[in-house]
Every structure is written in C-alpha cells, then in structure tokens.
Image (cartoon, helix red, strand yellow):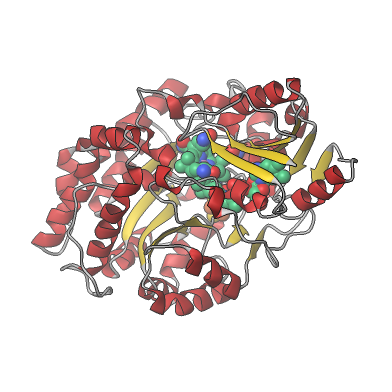
Amino acid sequence: MKIKMILPALTEAKSPFFRPVKYSLFPPLGLATLAGYLSEDDEVTLQDEHVETLDTSDDPDVVVIQVYITSARRAYELADHYRRRGSFVALGGLHVTSLPDEAAAHADAIFLGPGEDTFPAFIKDYRAGRPQKIYRSQVRTLDGLPRIRRDLIKRHLYLVPNSIVVSRGCPHSCDFCYKEAFFEGGKGFYTQTVDDALAEIERLPGRHLYFLDDHLFGNTKFAVRLFDAMRGMNRLWQAAGTVQSVLRPELLEKAVKSGLRSLFVGFETLSQNNLREQGKPQNLNRDYAAAIARLHDLGVMVNASFVFGMDDDDESVFERTVEWAVAQGVETATFHILTPYPGTALYARMMQQNRLLHSDWNLYDTRHTVFHPKQMMPEALEAGYWRAYKQFYQWRSIIRGARTKPDVISAARHVAYAGGWKKFEPLWDWVIRARRISHMLPVLEGVLTGFGKHGSYKHSLVSKSSPISPLRKTELSEIR
Ligand code: B12
Ligand code: SF4
C-alpha cells in the first residue's frame, strides 16, 4: 500500500515576509508516530510543508493529513485535491476533533482524538476493504507503542530534530486549552512507561532534547523516575512545565541534574481574577517571582508565557506584564492573544455571549484578536500585543533585565541572549533558506550548556562548557 502523510503549513509559514525559523524547529512527530503502525511492505512518505515544497502530482492509495486550526484551510485544499485524484483521504488531529463535521466534508475518514488506537484500527479495516467514516479514540495508552518512524523525518531541515513526547495530555483543564476537547471520552493524561521513554531517548543522537509534552512534570512519580534515570545520560534538554511544578521541592532539582536547561512556563496572567475566570486554579496564589528565582538559581533559562485579553485585562495589562517580566530578569517571553479554540469551554462561553468576531481559522493563531475583549477594543488588544513584544525586547528592557543578574558575566550573557536573536534574525532566515538549519544545533547546545555552567548561579551543573553564542533560541519559546 502507498501511504502519504502530510503536515500542511499555514500561509504565514511560507511567507517571505515572516521569519520562518519557528516553523523549522520541530519535525512532525505525531505523523511519524502513526507511521509506526504501518507494515514494512507499505511505501510511506512523510512531507512537512513548513520545510519543503509538497509534491502533489502523486497518486497514493491513502493520504493522511494532520489538521491544526491555523492550517485547516490548506489541509482541506490538499484533501480535496487528493480525493479528486482518487486517493483515500484520512484527516485527524486537533482541529478535526474540535470540528468533525467541517472536516468530514473533505475526508473519506475522520479521526477524533489521539491516534494510537484508531489509526491501527483503520489500517486493519482499510486492508480488509471496509474502512469506517469516523474513528473515535477510546483506548488511551502508550503501552506497546511501536517505534516512531524517525527514519521518515528529514532531520537536516530542523533545528530541533530531537523533539520527543513521552506522555499525552495534561492533568489540568484550563478553559482556553485544547486539551479537554481533544481528549474527550477517555483519559486526558497518561505517560509511557519510564523504560520506553528511556529507550526512545537512547535512540536519539547527540545531546540535545526538546520534550514537547504539555506537562512533563504532570505525573510526579513518572517524572522523578525518568529524571533519576536520565542523570547519567549526558543530555541537555528543554521542556514545558507549570508554576506549581517549579515550586515543588526536589522535582526541579532532579530535572536539572538530568540536564534541564530551559523551561517554558505558562504564567498566563498576573491577575487572580483572570486565573479564576479561565479555570486555572493551579496558578492561583502561586509566587511567580519565587518560581523564576528558583529556576535561575538552578541555572535554568525561563521562557515566560503570557496571554492577553482575558476579561480582567484593560489596556494597562501590556505594560504591567512586560514591566514585571523584565524586573524578574526573564530571558525570553512569549505573548499570546487569547484565542478561543472551537471545542473549548472558552469558545462555548464566547459563543454564548455572542463575542466571536469571525470563524476565519487562519487568524486563530494567537496573534490576531478574534473576539470582543471586555475592557478594550479588538484593535487595542492587537496593538498592545505587538507593543509588549517590542517593549520586552528593546535594549532598555534587556539591560534592565541584565541588571537583575548577580554578576557581570551573567548580566552580559542576558544581554547577549535576549538581544541577540533580533539582530540575527536575517541570519536565521539565511540559514533556513540555505538549508543549514541543522548546523545551528551545536550553537544551541552551547547556549544551553553555558547557561547551566557559567558563573553566577548557585549550582554548577554540567561538566563540559562551550562558547556562548549571542544567537538566541527565542523562537523555541513560541511553541504553544
Ligand atoms: C510542536 C508544536 C508546534 C510546532 C510544530 C508542529 C509540528 N511539527 O507538529 C510549531 C512551532 C510549528 C507550532 C506552531 C504553532 N502552534 Co503548535 N504546538 C506544538 C506542540 C507543543 C506539540 C505538537 C506535538 O508534536 N505533539 C505530540 C504528537 C505526538 O501529538 P500530535 O501531533 O497531536 O499527533 C497525535 C494526534 O493529534 C493524532 N493525529 C494527528 N494527526 C492525525 C491524522 C490522522 C489521520 C490520525 C488517525 C491521527 C492524527 O495522532 C497523533 C498521535 O496521537 C502542541 C502541543 C501538544 N502537546 O500537542 C502545540 C499546539 C499544537 N500548537 C498550537 C498552536 C496554536 C500553534 C500556533 C498557531 C501558535 C502560534 N502562536 O503561532 C502555530 C501554528 C501551527 C501551524 N503550522 O498551523 C496549539 C493548537 C491549537 C489547535 N486547536 O489547533 C497547540 C495544541 C498548543 C496549545 N496548547 O494551544 N506548534
Ligand atoms: S493550558 Fe497548560 S496546564 Fe492548562 S490544561 Fe493546557 S496544557 Fe494543561
């Protein structure tokens, strides 16, 4: 059987006017995972439109397309194209799960939820000549997961080819997050066995890893065992975690000893009212400043994530948030405009209050305002969002951030990290166009190694040092 797997790109990812490094970070891990269920006799190709031009002149038996909200329009275009050519088109992923009826109009079969149970079931049905129109995930486990088909990934096209996911979902359920909708009808958080996770890590070459799990620290027992076992593996890694998990005694220390050097933390908002409104009690009354200090003390860079436009936000929120982040010496910040994804509690609330502006999914990218904010005009929210980025990365802020560091070396490093990426933006662009992105991985490893090791922080954690480069990995913080 001939199978083609496609991760379509949103228009912006291909635009010559937009810095594309963000889209050259991670390979399509979800599709490579599903490919593991195919047999050796199957002829499989995997194309990621973010990093390569699609060849659409072929005639596969089955086309598997992963649909995100922002790439839905393009995904449907491709689906229609292949159906016209006579291929069987299977659509799955987050957006299909949120809006199955919309997707079904472009597919021969749709898949709701994670694919580890439904995809092998479909393959079996297809081979038997009786594929269903709709597959709903019910059995939620990563036990017995076949080997991810990393051989299908064109590693040289990505800055972070070693992305890895050892769990699915998250133990929390914030109103604005896709998580509840995607995992409806079954478990919403589960992990691999520690042994399987370690085996997958062993298979990845080099030192650097990026855990794309929603909440790697979500199951403490699992995390502790994983971090303890990773201690001798000489890895450098990045991940996402919650404020709560950062503040938890010992867990972070274990992570750091096993190679954690940079953490994406969802602070989301500085307003307690906003946290309550968005159903994020796990962040309520947490000492955000203490969380950042703790990460810095342990030599971990902070990628602080904030969402603007919740009901308690007025036009002062942008300056206040930036001011706070700069004062904490946060290395990088990612800002988002609140975006109600279909299927979420937030979306239902916005619908009910008649506050949605449109359903142009291309603009549901957290950079556009797609609803009526309570305390400002939609345009003011967008303008404030861009202002926040500008203010956070202006030299004055960078230097103020640097002043929070305990000594000159760390202050200089902060300036180089936070400032470097803006200046080197054209270089990133060139590197990607010249297909040299993988050559930058040693630089990234050097940055991460340097942060853990050098100078100012209380704990010196790694054995080898590398030169510090001013090239920042800011874009890595933009993954959620
Ligand atoms: C890595 C990542 C990216 C990367 C690369 C994506 C990639 N290569 O796949 C980059 C940086 C490009 C990115 C960009 C954006 N991202 Co992003 N990203 C992620 C992240 C952190 C991990 C994705 C991942 O690898 N998951 C692990 C794999 C195993 O799971 P999976 O991909 O979902 O695949 C499984 C299922 O979906 C299913 N499945 C998928 N396709 C199919 C098809 C079939 C036929 C079947 C049977 C099953 C199936 O089976 C797979 C195995 O279970 C997710 C969060 C998350 N935890 O998923 C956010 C996430 C997907 N991103 C999100 C967003 C909003 C964006 C941006 C719009 C952000 C922005 N501000 O610009 C952009 C635009 C993306 C686009 N191209 O359209 C949202 C999506 C919301 C939505 N409703 O679609 C998420 C969920 C984050 C969040 N919590 O809000 N992102
Ligand atoms: S926003 Fe983060 S903490 Fe909340 S449910 Fe989603 S992944 Fe979990």
- State whether residue 366 is above or below residue 105: below
Front residue of 394/200: it is: 200
Instruction: Give x and y (percent) for residue 171.
Output: 61, 61
Quadrant of ligand 1: it is: top right
Left or right: residue 324 versus residue 61 is left
Q: Report which quarter residue 221 is drawn in.
A: bottom right
- State whether residue 371 is above or below residue 440: above
Front residue of 73/184: it is: 73
Q: Residue at x 66, y 50 (%)?
A: 34
**Which quarter of the image is occupied by the N terminus?**
top right
Instruction: Give x and y (percent) for residue 293.
Output: 29, 64
Q: Report which quarter residue 385 is drawn in.
A: top left
- Outermost residue on the front side: it is 41
Q: Residue at x 83, y 39 (%)?
A: 134
Instruction: Give x and y (percent) for residue 216.
Output: 52, 63
Q: Residue at x 70, y 33 (%)?
A: 60
- Outermost residue on the left side: it is 408
Instruction: Give x and y (percent) for residue 128.
Output: 89, 45
